[in-house]
């Protein structure tokens, strides 16, 4: 939307991927101890040694949840990239995101600390839908996890950890494209990534507080206001 309204010449979807890469780095830093626990448990499980079973199980469920978004990236990448060029679509999907977040107010607090393979796959499908610009990845995945009766902090943790493999994979695929962009876009990618990282750290903290307090639906107002104003400006200019 900023690119559209301020006539910013962006390198395209590669820039968006690198901005998400900055947020993924923030997630890794914020959850570094938890990620290390899960990776260690999965490694020990693979080696058939003693391990923390719940941590290893979480790692496997994250792998299951990653498949849908990975499949979307492989089979419909060009269609997704074209969607990034439509500010009308972005604005409309922001309103849809607001509806998704608003619905969470009607979901009673769950008590489950873990999800099965079917639940992980459903949360992964929500993440796959969020490859469309305007659909909040964290909003969609946390809402799906809450709908599956996961306890709030567990839902938020699973949703954030689920972002790491997909975003890192997309960044790795786009790295070759970034090298081909040229030196004029190199600084934009670097500074965009840094800005995303620095802004994501406090954003993660605020979002986790909102989820655990049962206030995720408050973000719906922001999505509705931005989406509606953007549509109005686009359709009247």
Image: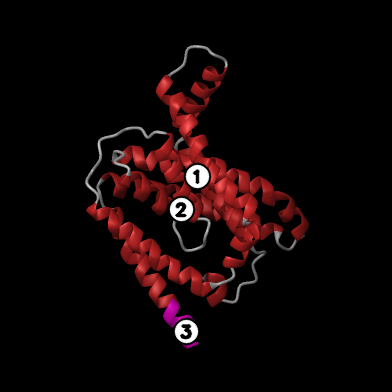
Sequence-wise first label, 3 or 2: 2
Mark 3 burial class by Cα count in 10 Å: few <14, some 14-19, many 20+: few
Q: Is residue 207 left or right of residue 134?
A: left
- What's the magenta region? 231-237
Q: Which residue is mark 3?
A: 235
* Frontmost residue, 106 versus 201: 106
* Frontmost residue, 194 versus 123: 123
Q: How many marks?
A: 3
Q: Is residue 208 visible?
A: yes
Give the residue drawn at x 54%, y 48%.
69
- How far across and down, in percent of the image, does residue 9 sit? 65, 71
Q: Is residue 46 highlighted in magenta?
A: no
**From what the image shows, is residue 236 above or below residue 183?**
below
3D distance between C-alphas at marks 3 and 2: 26 Å
**From what the image shows, is residue 189 above or below residue 163?**
below
- How far across and down, in percent of the image, does residue 220 sit? 33, 62
Q: Residue furthest front?
A: 118
Give the residue drawn at x 52%, y 24%.
42
Q: Which residue is mark 1?
A: 163
3D distance between C-alphas at marks 3 and 1: 34 Å
Q: Residue furthest top?
A: 49
Give the residue drawn at x 40%, y 24%.
54
Q: Which residue is mark 2?
A: 137
Q: Secondary structure at mark 1?
A: helix
Give the residue drawn at x 68%, y 52%.
174
Q: Residue furthest bottom?
A: 236
Q: Assign the magenta stretch its main secondary structure.
A: helix
Q: Give yes or no for contact between labels 2 and 1 (Cβ–Cβ under 8 Å).
A: yes
- How far across and down, in percent of the image, does residue 12 sit? 65, 64
Q: Is residue 230 left or right of residue 214?
A: right
Sequence-wise first label, 2 or 1: 2
């Amino acid at each position: 939307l900023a690119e559209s309204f301020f006539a910013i010449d962006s390198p395209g979807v590669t820039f968006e991927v690198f901005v998400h890469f900055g947020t993924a780095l923030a997630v890794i830093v914020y959850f570094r101890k938890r990620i290390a626990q899960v990776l260690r448990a999965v490694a020990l499980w693979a080696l058939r040694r003693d391990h923390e079973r719940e941590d290893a199980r979480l790692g496997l469920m994250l792998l299951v949840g990653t498949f849908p978004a990975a499949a979307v990236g492989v089979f419909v990448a060009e269609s997704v990239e074209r969607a990034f060029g439509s500010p009308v679509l972005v604005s409309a999907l922001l309103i849809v995101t607001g509806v998704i977040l608003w619905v969470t107010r009607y979901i009673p607090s769950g008590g489950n600390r873990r999800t099965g393979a079917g639940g992980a796959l459903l949360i992964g499908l929500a993440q796959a839908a969020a490859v469309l610009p305007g659909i909040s990845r964290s909003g969609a995945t946390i809402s799906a996890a809450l709908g599956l009766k996961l306890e709030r902090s567990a839902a938020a943790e699973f949703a954030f950890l689920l972002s790491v493999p997909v975003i890192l994979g997309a960044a790795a695929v786009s790295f070759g494209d970034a090298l081909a962009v040229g030196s004029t876009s190199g600084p934009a990618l670097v500074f965009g990534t840094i800005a995303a990282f620095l802004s994501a750290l406090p954003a993660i903290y605020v979002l986790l507080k909102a989820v655990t307090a049962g206030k995720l639906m408050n973000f719906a107002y922001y999505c509705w206001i931005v989406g509606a104003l953007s549509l109005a400006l686009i359709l009247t200019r």
